Image (spheres, helix red, strand yellow):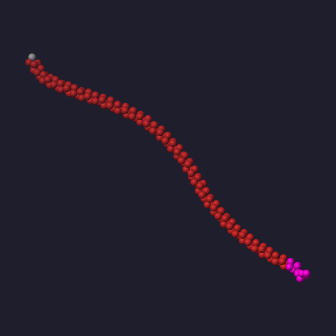
């Protein structure tokens, strides 16, 4: 059996080769197109993720800044509180000292007041005694005055009698 029909293997081979090359070119173009589209999708996704990541970082940084600011304010407030507590303790100590001084001065003033009251009472008694003596002396003077006036009147009355008796003699 002669099966040689005049096949031209070179042509078949070239046709097959051309078909494979077309398939390979189409496949390559499809692959390149697919990979380019995937690249673009990935690039867009990366951009979106990059923006999302940047936004997330910013969102995280804002509370961190707030935390840092509040931490600083808290430290300042603690320092102020410590200073105020120290000032309060110092003021309390000064108040205690001032209170003790005041109590001491009050005791001294009360003692001085008591002495003054005693002195005043003593002077009042002396004054009363002097007033009693003055009154007694006034009464005594008045009595002597009356006595003297009485003697003078007797003397005046007695004088003319003496003159008369002398003349008679």
Image quarter where the C terminus lies is: top left
Which residue is pictured at 37% across the width and 34% down the height?
113
> Is 123 placed left or right of 65 in the picture?
left
State the image quarter where residue 103 is shown. Answer: top left
- Report the residue that reaches farthest toward the left: 168
Q: Residue 123 at what x, y percent from top left?
A: 32, 30
Which residue is pictured at 24% across the width and 29% down the height?
135
Q: Residue 152 at what x, y percent from top left?
A: 16, 24
Q: Is residue 49 visible?
A: yes
> Is 117 placed left or right of 15 in the picture?
left
Span shown in magenta: 1-13
Q: Nearer the viewer, residue 21 or 168?
A: 21
Q: Is residue 163 visible?
A: no
**Compared with residue 107, is residue 81 higher up or lower down, i.e. above or below?**
below
- Report the residue that reaches farthest toward the right: 2
How many numbered callouts?
Answer: 0
State the image quarter where residue 45 is shown. Answer: bottom right
Q: Residue 151 at what x, y percent from top left?
A: 16, 23
**Is residue 90 a member of the stretch shown in magenta?**
no
Q: Magenta region, mostly helix, strand or loop? A: loop
């Amino acid at each position: 059996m002669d099966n040689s029909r005049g096949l031209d293997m070179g042509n078949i081979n070239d046709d097959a080769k051309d078909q494979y090359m077309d398939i390979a070119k189409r496949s390559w173009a499809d692959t390149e197109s697919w990979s380019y589209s995937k690249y673009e999708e990935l690039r867009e996704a990366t951009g979106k993720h990059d923006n999302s990541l940047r936004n997330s970082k910013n969102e995280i940084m804002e509370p961190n800044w707030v935390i840092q600011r509040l931490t600083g304010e808290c430290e300042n407030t603690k320092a102020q509180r410590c200073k105020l507590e120290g000032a309060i303790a110092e003021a309390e100590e000064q108040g205690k000292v001032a209170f003790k001084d005041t109590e001491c001065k009050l005791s001294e003033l009360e003692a001085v007041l008591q002495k003054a009251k005693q002195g005043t009472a003593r002077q009042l008694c002396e004054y009363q005694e002097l007033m009693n003596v003055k009154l007694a002396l006034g009464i005594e003077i008045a009595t002597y005055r009356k006595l003297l006036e009485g003697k003078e009147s007797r003397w005046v009355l007695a004088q003319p009698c003496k003159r008369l008796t002398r003349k008679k003699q």
